[in-house]
Image (cartoon, grey):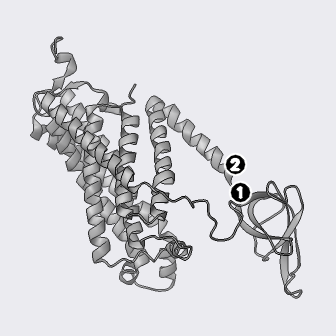
Amino acid sequence: MGHDHGATRLNIDVDDRIRRGMWAAVVVCAVGVIIGLIVLWPSRSDSGSDPLGLDGDPITAQVTSQAVEPCSYDPLLGCRQIELIPNSGAYVGERLTFEQSLNSPIRGGDSILVDVVIQDSGSPLIYFYDFERSTPLLLLLLVFVTAIVVLGRWRGVGALAGLAVSLVVIVGFILPALLEGSNALAVALVASGLIAFVALFLAHGFNLATAAALLASIASLALTAVLAWLFVVTSKFTGLADETVGYLSALGSDINPQGLLLAGVVIGSLGVLDDVTVTQVSAVWELKHAKPDSNFTELYNRALRIGRDHISSTVNTLFLAYAGASLPLLLLFSEAGQSLSSVATREIVAVEVVRALVGSIGLVASVPISTALAAATLASRSRPADEVPAEA
C-alpha cells in the first residue's frame, strides 16, 4: 500500500490522455536513470586498498590511564603517556602505551579509535585516530527513527525507507563512481534521479500526484545543474579550495575537483526540491478536490500564493544552512580584518555563496514548474472520483 502525502491521497479522475502522457514521461525518465546507472556503474575492484599503509579501519581501544611524563624524544618536555587496551586486532587485550601532547583531550576511561602499525622491529606504533562515538550516535538515531515513525506513521516509515535508499545510493554508487573518475555532474544527476524516484514513491505512494512531483523535481534539478555549471565555470572555480580534494589527489584518486563541486551543488539541492514540489502538487490536488470546476488559471494562481509563503521561508532556511556551515571560516576572515567584499570573492567563501544562490534559484523555479504541471494535469475534465459514474 502506498504511503501518501496529505492531499495526494485525494482520488481525482484525470483525463486518460493526460494520465498516459504523465506516466510515459515518468517511464522515459526512469529509462534515462537506468541507462545512466549502467554506463556510469563503477568497475574498480581496489576499493579495499590502503594507500596510507595503515591496517584497514581503525580499531577501538579502551583508555585505562593517562599520566604526564617526560617525552621520549626530549626529556625536558612533558607528554601525556596514554595506556590503552585494544578491543580487536593483533594486540587485543594487551596493554599498550603511546605519547600525546599535553593538550590532548584523551582521558582515562575514554573509548577511542587508533591505528596500530607493526614496525620492522616487531613493536607496535600507535596513532590516535579519533574518539569512538557509536553509542551517542546510535542513541540519537534511535530517537530520530522513533520520532519519525510516531508522528509520520506509515508515511514516516516510507520516508525512512527512502532515506535508507539514499544512503545506499551514495555509498554504493556515487562514491565509487567518483573515485573511479567518472563525470561528477553526470553521476550526481543520475544518482539524484534514482533517489528522487525511490524516495518520492516510497514516501508518497505510487499515484499521479507523486508522478507530477517527481517530474517537477527532475525538471528543477536539471535547471539547477545548468545554473551550477554556468556559474562555476564563469566564476573560474578550481574546486581546490577544499583541502580534502587535495588529499584525494595526493592519494592518486582521478577526480575532477570542479566536477566534484558541481556534483555537490546538485545533490545538496535535491532534498529541498522534493519537499517543495510535493507540497505544491498536494496543494493543487486539494484545491481541485475542494472546487472541481476550477480551471488551469484558478488552480495555478491559488496554489502559487501558497508556494510564495513556502518559498520565502525555505530559501532563508537554505541560505542559513550554508552560512552556518561556513561560520568558522567567516569568523577567521573577520578576525583577519578583511572586508566583506574581499571575503565574499575568495573561492572558499564564494563557492558557498554560489551553492546557496543557485540552490535557491532552483528552489524558486520549482514552485511555478510543479504548480503549472499539477494544474495542467487536473484542469481538463478531471473531477473527484466520488462524482465519477460507477461504470467509469
Residue 174 position, x and y percent, is 45, 56
* Three-letter amino acid code at the position of disc 1: Glu
Q: Which residue is mark 1?
A: 132
Q: Is residue 152 above or below residue 166?
A: above
Q: Are marks 2 and 1 in contact (CB under 8 Å)?
A: yes
The picture places residue 73, in percent across and down from the top left corner, at 84, 85
Q: Is residue 199 left or right of residue 291?
A: right
> Viewer-proximal residue, 46 or 301?
46
Measured as percent of width and height from the top left, residue 107 is found at 81, 64
Whether residue 289 is visible here, answered yes or no, is yes
Q: Secondary structure at mark 1?
A: loop
- What's the residue type where badge 2 is placed? Thr
* Total tally of numbered discs in the picture: 2
Mark number, residue 164 = none
| Above or below 334: residue 298 | above
Which residue is found at the position 12% from the left and 34% from the top? 379
Q: Tell me: 203 left or right of 108.
A: left
Residue 135's tag is 2
